[in-house]
């Protein structure tokens, strides 16, 4: 694979949590490449290190050893200031629990990443409204999160993750709080509005029903990547089993 | 980010009101209690400030404050009059005497005897009659609060209001007849007794027979005299104490500061107000931050720096602080205004605004600081935790 088309390159990433004198090795030498324009899913049993891995990739957690490059930049050796700027420009987040600010309207919530990047509030809110329109919430721009359904809140969160055109979007269990149909709608939306050739998506999920949306699926167990399956092997498997 | 900070703060109405109320309470206590304290303390010297004309008070060297009477011999008056630089010097009697009321009960009165000729040192405001009426035989002037209350005649119906003493009524002062010729208004002092003004010679006749009855010599300096120089001269010539009015006021004030429990009592309530206010407001503010911690984490993950979050929290603290302070000070002013005709002591100089302002600021800085520490230490990785 051409390195310049790589969004993420993890090499031998190790993360050990130390609580008291107990040590938990959450990542035990992870190697993973994610390409631009790709939707990568991370799957695996609970506690295998999925959240830890995307936290490292998103630059909100430092690994203990190994290297994680995002768009060619080594996150571990970045200054704090630089890393904040890097996150503000390049990373979009979608969470299982939506994590919208409850006191802000949909449009205000979506405008936050732009404001953090230094945009004027009025411009940011105007831009936010156009993105909310894209995710089908053009009518609810001034609604508070508490006035929206779970699916609608997640769509606001997706708009927030997209609004500043980041090159990498990380999602942790984006459909787990939603019923199946809403979850599929949210995934379809993500794939439609979020994915293009200059952007990569990493989605952690348990939800087997959305595996079809993935370009590749990385299976984790016990702090390792066990297997990375692409569309072809998946199709072949399905045929074998079918 | 400012509007986000404010919306986060006011997102939870209950907590927001709790913080503002805590600060209002603290600011109210920290303004109102000192105001009462200052009002009360000013009563310690209000007798001195009521006597406007003289520049210098001369008294026994051992006198510690205005109500601490150590009488002098009348001859001291003439010695003071002989000192160069003294324009005039007048005698004043001040002492507690028993009054017998018409119903046969006794009341202790604070009797003030003024120089017979000039009546210098009389009450600041006459409500009925004139000061000169004191020259009429057996004349006394009674302060309005005393006339209404302590010296008043008993109510015709049991348990009813007393009937106010009026001009023309008579009382007995130490078995001497005295007739009310005027009603005056005096500034309240610590002494709760009614104040009775009369002439110096009559006061002497009312008072129990003693060798010395002169309480103070009131001195007016000649124009252009240096008061400090004159007091020194009076002290040197007579061996008595001589104070300018300001000095006598601070002597009295200091005495009450150091020898009564008043400052410590008020100090404790101010401290309690501060602590309770800090506890309520600080706690609620901190709780508010804790509850919003996840939101701060999200902002951090999205690239907001500690500096930005710090400014957000400071802004929140400044806002609640300003509102709480304004309400507290406003309520204090309202309280003082509504109590202006009552017995309550209350004095609200502008310096008090600085005092309580500093107190409220301290609480806010403290509340913001513990919140800021929490937010700075916050790991953005918590955003993915369930
Ligand atoms: N902050 C932490 N302190 C200590 N141990 C932690 C911490 N976060 C995670 N761990 C441990 O690290 C391991 C990996 O956790 P992680 O959250 O990455 O798993 P996960 O694959 O996301 O699990 P799930 O599917 O349940 O979300 C687990 O054993 C977990 O207990
Ligand atoms: Mg997880």
Image (cartoon, coloured by chain):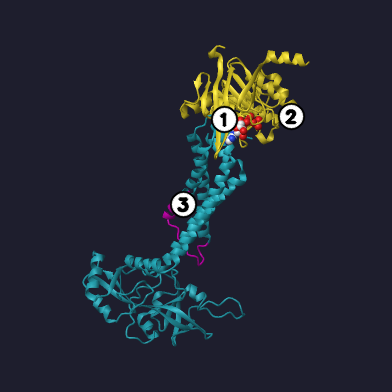
Give how far across and how far down residue A121 sits, in percent: 54, 29
The residue where tag 3 is placed is B359
Cα distance in 3D space between marks 2 and 1: 28 Å
Q: Chain of mark 1?
A: A
Circle 2 or circle 3, nearest the eye: 2
* SS of the residue under disc 1: helix
The answer to whether B187 appears left or right of A103 in the picture is left
The residue depicted at 50 percent of the width and 67 percent of the height is: B343
Q: Nearer the viewer, residue A159 or B174?
A: A159
The residue where tag 2 is placed is A179
Mark drawn on residue A112: 1
The residue depicted at 50 percent of the width and 55 percent of the height is: B275
Q: Nearer the viewer, residue B37 or B90?
A: B37
Q: Chain of mark 3?
A: B
**Residue A78 belongs to magenta span:** no
Q: Which mark sits nearer the N-terminus, 2 or 1?
A: 1
Disc 2 and disc 1 on one polypeptide chain: yes
Label 1 Cα crowd, 10 Å radius (few <14 / some 14-19 / many 20+): many
């Amino acid at each position: 694979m051409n390195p310049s088309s790589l969004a993420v390159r993890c090499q031998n990433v190790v993360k050990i949590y130390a609580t008291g004198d107990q040590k938990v090795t959450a990542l035990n030498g992870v190697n993973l490449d994610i390409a631009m324009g790709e939707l990568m899913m991370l799957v695996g049993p609970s506690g295998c290190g999925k959240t830890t891995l995307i936290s490292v990739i998103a630059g909100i957690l430092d690994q203990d050893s190994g290297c994680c490059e995002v768009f060619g930049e080594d996150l571990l050796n970045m200054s704090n200031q630089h890393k904040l700027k890097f996150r503000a420009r390049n990373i979009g987040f979608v969470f299982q629990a939506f994590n919208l600010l409850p006191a802000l309207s949909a449009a205000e919530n979506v405008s936050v990443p732009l404001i953090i990047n230094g945009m004027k509030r009025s411009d940011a809110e105007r831009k936010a409204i156009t993105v909310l329109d894209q995710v089908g919430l053009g009518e609810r721009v001034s609604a508070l999160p508490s006035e929206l359904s779970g699916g609608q809140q997640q769509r606001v969160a997706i708009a927030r993750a997209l609004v500043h055109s980041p090159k990498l979007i990380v999602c942790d269990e984006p459909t787990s709080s939603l019923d199946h149909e809403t979850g599929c709608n949210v995934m379809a939306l993500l794939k439609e509005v979020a994915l293009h050739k200059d952007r990569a998506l990493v989605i952690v999920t348990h939800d087997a029903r959305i595996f079809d949306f993935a370009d590749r699926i990385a299976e984790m167990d016990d702090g390792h990547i066990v297997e990375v399956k692409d569309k072809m092997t998946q199709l072949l498997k399905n045929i074998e089993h079918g | 980010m400012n509007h986000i900070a404010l919306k986060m703060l006011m997102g939870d109405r209950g907590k927001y009101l709790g913080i503002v109320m805590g600060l209002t309470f603290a600011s109210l206590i920290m303004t109102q209690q000192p105001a009462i304290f200052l009002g009360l303390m000013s009563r310690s010297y209000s007798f001195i400030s009521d006597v406007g004309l003289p520049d210098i008070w001369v008294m026994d060297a051992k006198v510690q404050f205005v109500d601490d009477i150590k009488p002098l011999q009348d001859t001291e008056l003439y010695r003071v009059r002989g000192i160069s630089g003294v324009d005039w010097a007048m005698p004043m009697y001040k002492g507690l005497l028993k009054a017998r009321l018409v119903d046969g009960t006794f009341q202790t009165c604070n009797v003030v005897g003024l120089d017979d000729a000039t009546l210098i040192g009389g009450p600041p405001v006459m409500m009925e009659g004139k000061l000169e009426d004191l020259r009429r035989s057996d004349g006394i002037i009674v302060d309005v609060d005393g006339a209404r209350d302590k010296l008043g005649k008993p109510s015709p119906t049991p348990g009813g209001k007393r009937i106010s003493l009026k001009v023309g009524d008579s009382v007995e002062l130490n078995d001497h007849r005295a007739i009310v010729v005027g009603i005056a208004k005096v500034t309240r002092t610590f002494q709760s007794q009614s104040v009775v003004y009369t002439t110096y010679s009559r006061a002497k006749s009312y008072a129990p027979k003693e060798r010395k009855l002169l309480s103070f010599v009131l001195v007016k300096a000649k124009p252009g005299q240096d008061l400090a120089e004159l007091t020194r001269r009076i002290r040197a010539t007579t061996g008595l104490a001589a104070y300018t009015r300001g000095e006598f006021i601070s002597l009295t004030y200091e005495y009450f500061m150091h020898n009564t429990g008043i400052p410590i009592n008020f100090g404790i309530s101010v401290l309690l107000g501060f602590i309770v206010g800090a506890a309520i407001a600080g706690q609620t503010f901190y709780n508010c931050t804790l509850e919003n911690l996840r939101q701060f984490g999200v902002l951090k993950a999205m690239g907001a720096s500690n500096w930005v979050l710090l400014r957000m929290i400071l802004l929140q603290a400044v806002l609640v602080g300003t509102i709480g302070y304004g309400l507290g000070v406003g309520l204090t002013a309202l309280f003082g205004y509504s109590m202006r005709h009552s017995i309550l002591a209350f004095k609200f100089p502008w310096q008090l605004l600085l005092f309580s302002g500093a107190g409220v600021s301290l609480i806010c800085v403290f509340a913001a600081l513990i919140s800021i520490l929490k937010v700075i230490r916050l790991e953005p990785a918590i955003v993915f935790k369930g």
